[in-house]
Amino acid sequence: MRKLPEDKLLIATHNKGKLTEFQSLLAPYVKKIVSAGALGLPEPEETGQTFYDNAFIKAKAAGEATGIPSLADDSGLCVNALGGKPGVLSARWAHDAGSFPVAMQRLHEALKESKDRTAFFVCSLVLFWPDGQSISVEGRCDGALVWPMRGTGGHGYDPIFQPLGEMRTFAEMEASEKDNESHRGRALRALAEMFSQK
């Protein structure tokens, strides 16, 4: 079993909000973290049908381009009343809408006739080594959508997502609190636990 790269790890993202979360969650394990955005790497086209597929595409592209072990995630919001949408298209929905606030407004409007507000976030992580080996883990956080938007923290759909057992949205939580609850935090802890097993 390989060790988690302790000296240097490339996070294959151009998303500053995601990078901040990764830096916080990985601080106990990795000495130096660099991002694809900071290195000016191009963003590969995410053509996968699953969260894993897209995470692998991003991790592989970054690892092969730099020769640095690369960690990528693909994550999204899955709304049960909408058949799991936006799912792997979560970022694209926001891009097509022009912004996340507009995308959240559209989600709210799509759910007006539905009493089912349950939803969940998924995060698929892929760690890719330049020699072609990789491992993957997944994290999930269940909850419900609320309206109106609440909170100014976090990023993406956080202002309308209230995790199970909480009265606050992700955007109303301190970063450390969100890390404990979030799909990304759970996936990264699963990754760390994988490397700690004997």
Image (cartoon, helix red, strand yellow):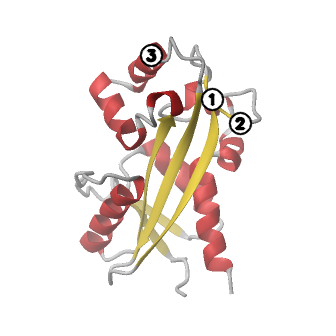
> Does residue 27 show up?
no
Of residue 74 and residue 110, the one placed in the foreground of this image is 110
Q: Does residue 34 lie above or below 113 as drawn? A: below
Q: Residues within 10 Å of mark 2 (few under 14, many from 20)?
A: some
Which of labels 3 and 1 is toward the front?
A: 1
Quadrant location of the C terminus in the rendered image: bottom right
Q: Is residue 52 left or right of residue 143?
A: left
Rendered location of residue 153, percent (x, y): 59, 31
Q: Amino acid at mark 3?
A: Gln
Q: Residues within 10 Å of mark 1 (few under 14, many from 20)?
A: some
Q: Amino acid at mark 2?
A: Leu
Q: Amino acid at mark 1?
A: Ala
- Residue at image location 59% in from the left, 23% down from the top: 116
Res. 164 mark: 2
Q: Residues within 10 Å of mark 3 (few under 14, many from 20)?
A: some
Quadrant location of the N terminus in the rendered image: bottom right
Rendered location of residue 48, percent (x, y): 29, 54
SS category of the residue bearing label 3: helix
SS category of the residue bearing label 1: strand
Of residue 53 and residue 74, the one placed in the foreground of this image is 53
- Residue at image location 53% in from the left, 55% down from the top: 22
Task: Identify the residue under disc 1.
Answer: 144
Res. 71 mark: none
Q: Earlier in the sequence, mark 2 or mark 3?
A: 3
Which of labels 2 and 3 is toward the front?
A: 2
Q: Earlier in the sequence, mark 2 or mark 1?
A: 1
Task: Identify the residue under disc 3.
Answer: 105
SS category of the residue bearing label 2: loop
Rendered location of residue 135, percent (x, y): 46, 73
